[in-house]
Image (spheres, rainbow, N blue to C red):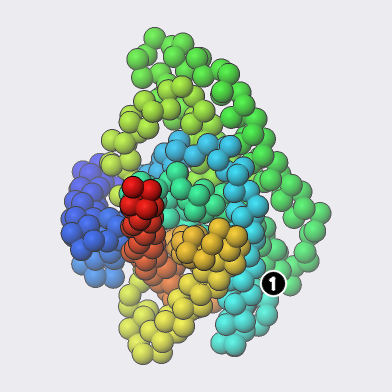
Amino acid sequence: MHHASDILLTLFIIFIAAQIGAEVAQRLKLPGVVGEIAAGCAIGPSLLGWLSPGDILAGTPVDVLAEIGVVLLLFAVGLETRLDDLKKVGKSAFLVGTLGVILPFAAGALWAHGEGFAWIKSLFVAAAFVATSAGITARVLQELGVLQRTESRVILGAAVIDDILAMLLLGVVSSLQGGGSLDLQSLVLTLAGAIGFVAIIGWGGTRVMRSKSGWLEAPINPHSALTLVLALCLGLAWLSTRFGLAAIIGAFLAGMIASETRQRDELEHQTLPLLAFLTPFFFVVTGAKINLAELASAQALWMLAVVTLIAIASKLAGGFLGALSLGRRSAAIVGFGMVPRGEVGVVIASLGLAAGVFSEQIYAIIVAMSLLTAMITPPVLAWLLRRQGEDGQRDDGKTASADG
């Protein structure tokens, strides 16, 4: 039973730790999200213990607040993404999302089987290598102010496709555990439902909002536009889970729908304070979920290094090959943008542990891999984006000089 005073103290600790971590990271020229995740590791059960294991369990007040934080983050990202912009990169996004699932899944299965897992269990382990954490990459892109770039649109579009395919794969490997038979009809219906949900909400919702955005100002409440689109965000986040998708996909679609309204700029401005308060909880809780005690051996650390290298290389290769039509440098940006696993890998690892598929140590390694990819990617992605921006400015300067 959580007492109100204890919850408030825990929230205070998390929020202050997030601010300190983000400040230190930004002073070191790193994205703030890296510092927030590191702060979670520091105050979590593994180190300082200021957050107990019970504080970060699914369904606790802290976990719920963290979930709301990432839902709002993807809503805000959707606000800066128009459907027409995503259509322009549809082919590249599809290739990135597809290859970014196939290659990590194959690499993860081969590694797990090489470690002695039966093929059925290897497939479950491999599922943790698959899904990109859109929340991590979205935060970096938002911090750098590059959500309007082609690479960012490809990453966000691919993340939706990635989530659908990851959901399908998880359904397949879960049904195979314990010798269960594979229900192809159920899987096909689930896949069709997920694709239909994204298509109908994304395409139909934006068309309706383009012509009917005036109803957002019909209530007397001066903040009616914000309150109504937030209600849409929460509703679609819940609805997406009913179709087997992550809640953040529904939130992203809600933001994309709201981006078609004439109140778009006002909504972006009004959501900033909400993001500043809520999103740090998600990243701190993500960092706090790693159990460092299970990694306190040379064998475990070596295995973690190998797993992390496989996870990065396979996802980077899938994203790079899928986006190669954009040019090598843009393809590298897209590839790194797809690397973070974050909370998705943690969820799959938790399911595998509960099902008895693997041990506490393998669970800790998979969780640590998910968090390491979430921490390694942001600085690399930020460096690549800044470098490309500087080269672009340099090229513009040379062009201007030549014209002069």
Q: How many marks?
A: 1
- Compared with 111, 39 (above or below) is above
Query: Which residue is most to the bottom?
Result: 298
Q: Is residue 259 visible?
A: yes
Residue 210 position in % (x across, y down): 56, 23
Q: Which residue is mark 1?
A: 178
Residue 226 position in % (x across, y down): 40, 25
Count residues near mark 1 (Cα–Cα under 10 Å), then give few for <14, some for 14-19, many for 20+.
few
Query: Between 318 and 295, which is closer to the camera in this rendering?
Result: 318
Classify residue 293 by image quadrant: bottom left
Picture residue at 22% right of the left edge, 57% below the top: 26
User: Left of 80 or right of it: where is 382?
Assistant: left
Query: Which residue is most to the right?
Result: 185
Element marked by disc 1 = helix
Q: Is residue 117 visible?
A: no
Q: Amino acid at mark 1?
A: Gly
User: Left of 156 or right of it: where is 400?
Assistant: left
- Compared with 402, 122 (above or below) is below
Residue 393 position in % (x across, y down): 34, 53
User: Left of 333 or right of it: where is 30?
Assistant: left
Residue 25 position in % (x across, y down): 23, 60
Picture residue at 54% right of the left edge, 62% below the top: 327
Picture residue at 35% right of the left edge, 15% below the top: 222
Picture residue at 33% right of the left edge, 75% below the top: 292
